[in-house]
Amino acid sequence: MKTIKLLNIAMICMAMIFISCSGEDGEDGLQGNQGQPGIQGEKGDKGDTGLQGSPGEDGNANVVNITFDASAHTGNTFQMDSELITEASIIKDAYLFYIKSVGNFYSVPGIGPLAAYSTRSYIGTGSAFINFRSVDGTANYSVSEGEVEEVRMVIIEGNDVTPSGKSGNILDQFKKDGVDLNDYHAVMAYLNK
């Protein structure tokens, strides 16, 4: 029995030695080969069809930008003749006018460079006119040669006519999209021209 006791004590001691020893971790082994991909699962049921969206507004691809040389012009009215200015166009299309002076564009109606004069436009079948006035609008202003370099007339084809006969939604869309109609370059960028 003594032998069994001694043997039990020896086993307990050895177990304690193995449990109390803490060795350092060894280096990680090499990465094993990647496993094979699994079998693709079954295709799921088709989802419900979404609701039809409301149609967008028609685009406006027809834009004409005409430049008139005004560098030799003198007087208080500049006339622009064009066969594009028809009675139907005047009713349904939007017309924008800009004068170029001292290298910058100024919208019409508006104030010219250095607040020297004001401008306004008139349209009749076959011709459009820019009238130069004093800043307060009370008297004609006569521009001298070279004071106005050019006049730009932008015609944007209308796609809706308001009861007053004017194409309201085209210019309204510019405003909704944050385009400053007084800024010639912003208008041209918006129209991709």
Image: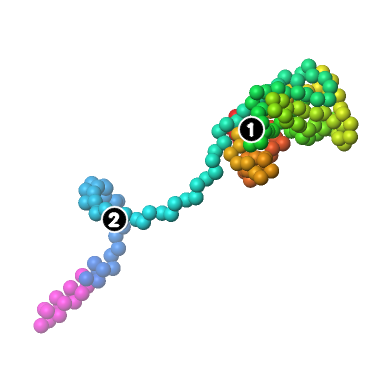
Say the numbered circle drawn on residue 179: none
Q: Is residue 144 left or right of residue 37?
A: right
The residues bearing labels 1 and 2 have C-alpha atoms spaced at a distance of: 57 Å
Residue type marked 1: Ala
**Which SS does the magenta portion mostly show?**
helix
Image quadrant containing the C terminus: top right
Instruction: Give above or below for 58 relative to 123.
Output: below
Q: At 24% from the left edge and 51% from the top edge, which residue is drawn?
A: 40
- Start-end of magenta stretch: 1-14
Which is more toward the observer, 102 or 12? 102
Residue 76: x and y in percent read 83, 25
Name the residue tied to disc 2.
44
Element type where label 2 sits in the image: loop
Q: Is residue 129 left or right of residue 117?
A: left
Q: Is residue 56 left or right of residue 170?
A: left
Name the residue tied to disc 1.
88
Query: From where the camera sits, is residue 146 visible?
Result: no
Q: At 72% from the left edge and 23% from the top edge, which residue is drawn?
A: 80
